[in-house]
């Protein structure tokens, strides 16, 4: 089946080579980082995690989002999702690949990475994160590939795959719960020390992952003969809308607890992110834009008349995707480090090589997704002709 | 580098052998400070400080810092220099890249949870010396995915630079900002400064985390921590588990503060004011 990725139009190949070019520039930057050290990034003694870990966190969520199609299809036999669920699983494969790469580029001694296996440490949340992420990647490869292969042959999904499908549901929840535990379990970082961290992570994940899926499904219908039932897309859009409402609701819980209790430590990071703290406000514009985009997205997706028009639908899900990307893929990690343990402020801004490395990981994700979607589309097109 | 691998391994081997005999070393240099019956102790977590020590380990090393003595600022410099030299700590120009094992800061930054705008000027302006707290319940050791940082039976929170993968989870977890990461190769500034290196302690490589190690390498050789040796009147160390130790005596007599007690980490560094 994989050979189908090698047959494509000039546009397809142009896109693939464009991604490869971006990846090679990023790879050069990574070699530069490997040679000189992580000092070439904007990270510092005070802001010891930056865009790499923030993006890692975000894409764990995107990966977990696939479960929003798996549950209706396999637990409730919602057949409208039968043709598109594999596209969600393939997003998960690409997103987890990106997560693993973001971890690799972030660690100071990548050649010692296997120490995590050599010295397994069950009291560290990173140990569990390694297990759940690699497990989720494997599950989605097994399920996605075999269900697609069965479709290609016109056969029902083989029985042995079923347990993996059911396993993928709690596993998807686990990847983002454990990722939230990386943050929610450390003392002294007020923005992170919150019991709603994992629920909020899941809510924003179930908004972000399906948003991306809708954008991609609308796009692939332009470049292929594959057609998706509009009702299926509408159902996914409703999922996005409700999940985003829960996410915003939980964010307001954070605001209430901090500002009504008046506890300075709880207020400070929110103040920094949304209003500026002691004259430091480099993220305020982003965070306010994120909040605005979140409301705009909810507004559009909530109104059926707007949601049913593709232009508005794209605007709605794109707003949600960007809102969650800024909120979780930037603000959450940086805000946790501000103010620092001495209640002074060091700000962070990513450097060019750091941004290039992050962009090239996006390009790797896009490349994986392109190849997997090419396979899926070729099978779906055949099914439609038959 | 003035120390090659072989020399380092020899030194490390010697330290390890000395480590086995550390009880003897304690008896020699801190008479009455270590219970003679047992060095290893029970590594039961949770117990340890403030009168409950009897049920806990036999050795619980701690440091009391007489901050009032630091009004004489030359002592701060002396202590910092002693630590820098003992551990080949590089000096970076940028605050972002700094490696800090022991350094000074003001009350309001050291105890940000105990803001007091009416604090006596005398205390407000004192240079408090900051270092790793060698917590009884260290969050850094809890989160480390490879046990590169771990708590020893004597209470020291140690760091293995050769196992550390540089994920910096410990830096996020430490509520005291005690950990530094080698963003660049630390040997570059050491070379540029032309500093005389201490061949008894390894320089580090880029990409690993480091912090105050309570001079475990010196303790293993029967020496005192470098800061204690530099200013024994300021830096008072000893065994918290022993009610008759010097540190327990000074803690009984003087008012002491510890950082961020509400987090439950139980710091082993006490500030005498």
Image: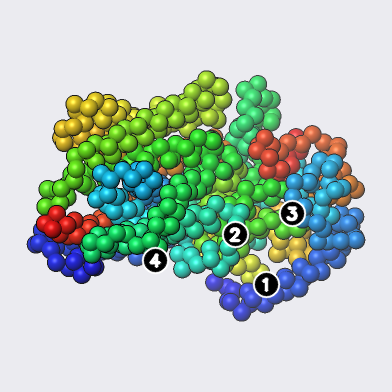
The first of marks 3 and 1 along the sequence is 1
Residue B116 left/right relative to B30:
left
Q: Nearer the viewer, mark 1 or mark 2?
A: 2
Chain letter of mark 2 equals A
Q: Provide the residue designation for mark 2.
A: A121
Callout 3: few (<14), some (14-19), or many (20+) C-alpha neighbours within 10 Å? many
Residue A353 left/right relative to B174:
left
Q: Tell me the element at label 4.
A: helix
Tag 4 and tag 3 share a subunit: no
Q: Provide the residue designation for mark 4.
A: A35
Tag 1 and tag 2 share a subunit: no
Callout 2: few (<14), some (14-19), or many (20+) C-alpha neighbours within 10 Å? some
Chain letter of mark 3 equals B
Q: Provide the residue designation for mark 3.
A: B155
Give the residue at x 68% y 73%.
B11
The quarter of the picture where the C terminus of chain A appears is: bottom left
Q: Is residue A100 visible?
A: no
Q: Nearer the viewer, mark 4 or mark 2?
A: 2
Q: Tell me the element at label 1.
A: helix
Residue A250's image quarter? top left
Q: Provide the residue designation for mark 1.
A: B12
Chain letter of mark 1 equals B
Q: Tell me the element at label 2.
A: loop
Q: CA distance from mark 4 to mark 2?
A: 29 Å
Give the residue at x 62% y 37%.
B110
Tag 4 and tag 1 share a subunit: no
């Amino acid at each position: 089946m994989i050979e189908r990725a090698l047959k494509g139009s000039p546009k397809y190949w142009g896109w693939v080579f464009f991604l490869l070019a971006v990846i090679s520039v990023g790879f050069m930057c990574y070699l530069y980082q490997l040679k000189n050290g992580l000092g070439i990034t904007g990270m510092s003694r005070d802001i010891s995690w930056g865009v790499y870990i923030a993006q890692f966190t975000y894409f764990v969520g995107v990966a977990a989002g696939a479960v929003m199609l798996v549950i209706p299809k396999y637990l409730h036999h919602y057949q409208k999702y039968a043709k598109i669920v594999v596209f969600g699983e393939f997003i998960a494969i690409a997103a987890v690949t990106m997560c693993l790469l973001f971890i690799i580029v972030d660690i100071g001694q990548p050649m010692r990475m296997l120490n995590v296996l050599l010295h397994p440490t069950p009291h560290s949340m990173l140990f569990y994160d390694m297990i759940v992420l690699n497990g989720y990647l494997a599950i989605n490869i097994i399920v996605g590939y075999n269900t697609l292969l069965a479709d290609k042959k016109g056969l029902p999904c083989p029985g042995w795959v079923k347990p993996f499908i059911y396993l993928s549901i709690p596993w998807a929840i686990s990847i983002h719960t454990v990722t939230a535990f990386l943050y929610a379990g450390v003392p002294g970082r007020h923005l992170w020390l919150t019991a709603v961290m994992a629920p909020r992570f899941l809510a924003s994940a179930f908004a972000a992952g399906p948003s991306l899926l809708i954008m991609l499904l609308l796009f692939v219908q332009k470049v292929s003969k594959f057609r998706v039932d509009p009702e299926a897309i509408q159902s996914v859009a409703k999922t996005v809308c409700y999940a985003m409402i829960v996410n915003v609701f939980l964010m307001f819980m954070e605001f209430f607890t901090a500002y009504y209790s008046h506890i300075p430590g709880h207020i400070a990071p929110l103040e920094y992110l949304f209003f500026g703290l002691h004259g430091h406000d480099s993220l305020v514009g982003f965070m306010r834009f994120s909040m605005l985009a979140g409301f705009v997205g909810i507004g559009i997706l909530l109104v059926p008349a707007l949601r049913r028009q593709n232009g508005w639908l794209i605007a709605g899900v794109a707003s949600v995707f960007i809102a969650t990307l800024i909120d979780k893929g930037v603000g959450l990690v940086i805000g946790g480090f501000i103010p620092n343990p001495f209640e002074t402020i060091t700000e962070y801004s990513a450097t060019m090589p750091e941004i290039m490395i992050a962009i090239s990981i996006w390009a790797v994700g896009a490349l994986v997704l392109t190849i997997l979607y090419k396979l899926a589309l070729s099978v779906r097109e055949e099914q439609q002709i038959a | 580098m003035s120390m090659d691998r072989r020399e380092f391994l020899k030194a490390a081997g010697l330290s390890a052998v000395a480590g086995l005999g550390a009880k003897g070393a304690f008896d020699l240099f801190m008479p009455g400070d270590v219970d003679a019956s047992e060095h290893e102790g029970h590594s039961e977590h949770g117990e340890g400080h403030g009168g409950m020590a009897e049920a806990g380990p036999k050795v619980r090393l701690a440091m009391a810092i007489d901050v009032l003595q630091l009004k004489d600022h030359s002592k701060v410099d002396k202590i910092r220099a002693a630590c820098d030299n003992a551990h080949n700590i590089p000096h970076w120009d940028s605050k972002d890249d700094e490696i800090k094992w022991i350094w000074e800061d003001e009350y309001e930054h050291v105890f940000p949870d105990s803001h007091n705008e009416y604090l006596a000027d005398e205390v407000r302006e004192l240079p408090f010396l900051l270092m790793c707290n060698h917590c009884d319940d260290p969050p850094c050791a809890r989160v480390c995915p490879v046990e590169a940082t771990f708590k020893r039976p004597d209470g020291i929170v140690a760091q293995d630079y050769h196992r550390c993968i540089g994920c910096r989870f410990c830096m996020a977890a430490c509520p005291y900002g005690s950990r530094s990461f080698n963003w660049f190769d630390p040997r570059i500034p050491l070379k540029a400064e032309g500093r005389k290196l201490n061949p008894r302690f390894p320089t580090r490589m880029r990409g690993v985390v480091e912090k105050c190690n309570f001079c475990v390498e010196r303790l293993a050789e029967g020496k005192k921590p470098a800061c204690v040796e530099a200013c024994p009147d300021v830096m008072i160390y000893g065994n918290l588990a022993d009610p008759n130790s010097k540190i327990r005596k000074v803690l009984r007599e003087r008012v002491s503060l510890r950082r961020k007690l509400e987090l439950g980490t139980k710091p082993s560094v006490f500030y005498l004011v």
